[in-house]
Image (cartoon, rainbow, N blue to C red):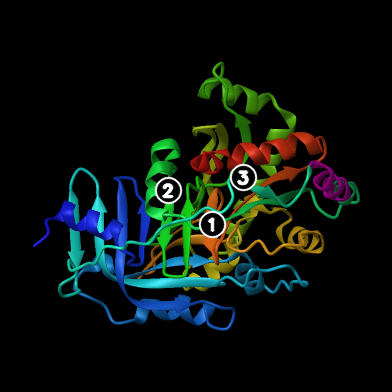
């Protein structure tokens, strides 16, 4: 019989569907899925509220669903209608119920309810990338036109901040396991994850936690502020830059106020507090400006209530959230797909953890795509925001060099 390390290597070399999720102590891998549920606007509420009543296993860590909600689904959930957009018709959302969990930390710990789970066949599939360079859906000229239109909307009072999305794409298929671990060596991020499926792959180094719910306490960690890394900069100098930069401060304050407002809808009066204010997080190519907010959830709030209040995350859209999404819908010709949706885990006791799907690569139907966005506010310039988008995409684009 295979030992734990041999089994894990065999699992990587197979084509068995699996999910990897970064944790504080290492990584959790989920596989041997007994259920795969496609989520749409008709069954979203039912799924969120019924999963806590589903039949439980003796292994508590396996009483969960892991998966994602796409951006469009989350918008439709709060009553937003979409115009016709170009779409790849990817899944609106998918969640999986695992029978096996592997925790990778100082040791490899495996828990499973599946008989003979170590019996795995090796996959011999070859992965082809049909072109080397990524194509970008918006040139600087095209981006500048949208930027200028949104700047007018801001001056007219229709929005205060808005995030323009750009998409890098190329043809090919990826070995998602190899790509994920290469990415983790380059740019490990707190909300990194991988999904390997028969019909698609997702690889992510997302830095942003949208929901961390344990018992009746909930936290969210909006990111608003990006600074390109140089040899002369460290975290202290980056913090000084953010504090002194009027544009970055305005953007950050607006997003934090919006997230506090979203939390206030589901939390007890007076319980929403700033947990960590305006901290700097360091990544491979950039520094981020981050605040953590927490609150105590009101009695009788369902998971659907919580997700409807907080998703889609405002830090990657703009504010005010609803009217800004509607403005974006009129200008964005391409479906955002998974970008700015949320990936995470829901436990049977109601605890949840969800990120925002940024810095996230999708491989579907022989297409590889990655979307990024930066914010338009009064005082920002099209060229600066256009270049900032490249900085955000760089860690994933560099995987293909």
Label located before the other in sequence (2 or 3): 3
Q: Position of residue 243 (x, y in %)?
A: 64, 27
Q: Where residue 360 appears, x then y in whole percent?
A: 53, 52
* Residue 30 seen anywhere in this rendered image of the structure: yes
Secondary element type, mark 3: loop
Is residue 276 placed above or below 153 in the rendered structure?
Answer: above
Q: Which residues are magenta?
A: 140-150
Tag 1, which secondary structure?
A: loop
- Residue 137: % across, % down: 73, 52
Total marks placed: 3
Queried whether the magenta region covers residue 401, the answer comes back as no
Which residue is the site of mark 3?
Answer: 133
Few, some or many residues within 10 Å of mark 2 (<14, 14–19, 20+): some
Q: Residue at x 88, y 50 (%)?
A: 149
Crowd around label 3: few <14 · some 14–19 · many ≥20 (10 Å): some
Q: Which SS does the magenta portion mostly show?
A: helix
Q: Are marks 1 and 3 in contact (CB under 8 Å)?
A: no
Nearest-to-viewer mark from 2 and 3 = 3
Vertical side of 390 occupied by 213: above or below: below
Residue 179, numbered circle: 2
- State the residue position of label 1: 172
């Amino acid at each position: 019989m295979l030992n734990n390390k041999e089994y894990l290597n065999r699992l990587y070399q197979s084509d068995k569907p699996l999910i990897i999720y970064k944790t504080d102590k290492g990584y959790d891998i989920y596989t041997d899925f007994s259920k795969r549920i496609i989520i749409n606007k008709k069954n979203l509420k039912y799924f969120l509220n019924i999963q806590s009543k589903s039949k439980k296993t003796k292994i508590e860590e396996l009483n969960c669903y892991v998966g994602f909600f796409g951006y469009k689904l989350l918008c439709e959930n709060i009553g937003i209608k979409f115009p016709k957009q170009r779409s790849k018709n990817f899944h609106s959302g998918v969640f999986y119920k695992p029978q096996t969990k592997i925790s990778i930390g100082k040791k490899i710990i495996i828990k499973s309810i599946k008989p003979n789970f170590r019996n795995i066949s090796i996959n011999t599939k070859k992965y082809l990338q049909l072109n080397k360079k990524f194509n970008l859906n918006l040139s600087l000229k095209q981006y500048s036109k949208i930027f200028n239109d949104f700047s007018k909307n801001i001056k007219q009072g229709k929005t205060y901040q808005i995030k323009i999305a750009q998409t890098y794409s190329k043809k090919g298929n990826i070995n998602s396991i190899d790509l994920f671990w290469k990415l983790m060596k380059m740019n490990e991020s707190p909300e990194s994850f991988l999904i390997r499926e028969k019909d698609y792959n997702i690889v992510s180094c997302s830095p942003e936690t949208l929901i961390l719910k344990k018992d009746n306490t909930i936290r969210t960690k909006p990111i608003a502020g990006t600074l390109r890394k140089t040899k002369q900069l460290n975290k202290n100098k980056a913090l000084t830059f953010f504090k002194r930069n009027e544009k970055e401060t305005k953007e950050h304050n607006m997003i934090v106020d919006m997230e506090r407002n979203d939390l206030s809808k589901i939390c007890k009066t007076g319980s929403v507090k700033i947990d960590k204010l305006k901290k700097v997080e360091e990544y491979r190519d950039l520094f981020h400006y981050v605040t953590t907010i927490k609150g105590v959830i009101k009695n009788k709030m369902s998971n659907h209530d919580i997700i409807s209040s907080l998703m889609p995350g405002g830090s990657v859209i703009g504010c005010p959230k609803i009217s800004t999404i509607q403005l974006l819908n009129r200008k964005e010709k391409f479906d955002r797909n998974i970008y700015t949706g949320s990936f995470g885990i829901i436990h049977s006791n109601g605890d949840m953890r969800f990120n925002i799907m940024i810095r996230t690569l999708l491989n579907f139907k022989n297409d590889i795509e990655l979307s990024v966005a930066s914010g338009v506010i009064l005082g920002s310039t099209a060229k600066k925001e256009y270049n900032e988008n490249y900085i955000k995409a760089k860690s994933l684009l560099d995987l293909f060099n």
